[in-house]
Image (tube, grey):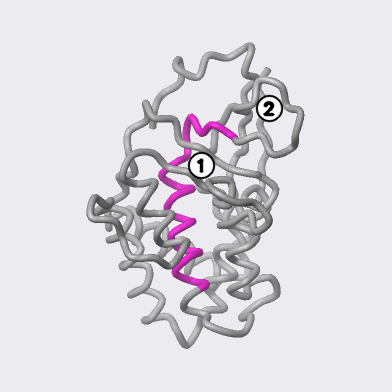
Amino acid sequence: VMKATEAKLLDFLKKSPQFVIPIYQRTYSWTEKEVRQLWDDILRAGQNDDISAHFMGSVVYVEKGLYSISAQSPLLVIDGQQRLTTVSLLIAALASAIGEGEPIEGFSPRKLRNYYLLNPEEEGERHFKLILSQTDKASLISILKDAPQPKEHSIRITENLKLFQELLVGQKEDLETVCKGIAKLMVVDISLDRDQDNPHSFSRV
């Protein structure tokens, strides 16, 4: 009924067509403290060849399509939205910070956007890998489109993006370490069987 596998976060993002945050979940809420903690973990892993992986916890989801006719069925995220959103903000900021070039294999701005943030061949909402709820949704989409923020925007999303941009400026002589650290992030990928498990019985973290 429940499948749990360890996965590199980047591989997991790359293969997943789309994550959708259900409307009943609380909105994105990570504070500066949590963002800085993740940043420190990424730098520590990136600087140290003895650290092979940094576990970020689990991502729990249900396939949204009742019948999986297409492989493009969105995944309904039951747990893990805070981590997925924060990493998406970091990748968006990193793609801009790199500008041109490829600090390490696979980390060119184009690859970062097209593997982990966007579905380049899709249109409309399907173009985006992560669909948040409420004001978070419009704010993240504006960032990914490089468009101005809507009047009703998400403070946490915009502030955490700004924080990553500032941290990356401080690290601009060594973006390779950031890339290496992100490549070491691991999650436990937990998929629930839609018919067997009621997602409402899971904690709404």
Q: Position of residue 134 (x, y in %)?
A: 33, 39
The single residue placed furthest to the bottom in the displayed view is 173
Q: What amino acid is at disc 1?
A: Gly
User: Is residue 171 depicted above or below 188 in this figure?
Assistant: below
Cα gap from disc 2 to disc 1, whole angstroms: 15 Å
Q: Badges 2 and 1: C-beta atoms under 8 Å apart? A: no
Between circles 2 and 1, the one closer to the viewer is 2
Q: Is residue 90 magenta?
A: yes
User: Which mark, residue 3?
Assistant: 2
Q: Is residue 123 magenta?
A: no
User: Is residue 65 depicted above or below 137 in this figure?
Assistant: above
Rendered residue at 58%/52% (across/down): 127
Question: Between 77 and 118, which is closer to the camera in this rendering?
Answer: 118
Specify the quadrant that holds the N terminus: top right
Q: Position of residue 64 (x, y in %)?
A: 60, 27
Return the residue at label 1.
57
Rendered residue at 38%/81% (across/down): 169
Residues shaded magenta:
75-95
Rendered residue at 49%/71% (across/down): 94
Q: Secondary structure at mark 2?
A: strand
Horizontal arrangement in the rendering, residue 23 relative to residue 149 (left or right): right
Question: Between 185 and 156, which is closer to the camera in this rendering?
Answer: 156
Q: What amino acid is at disc 2?
A: Lys
Specify the quadrant that holds the C terminus: top left
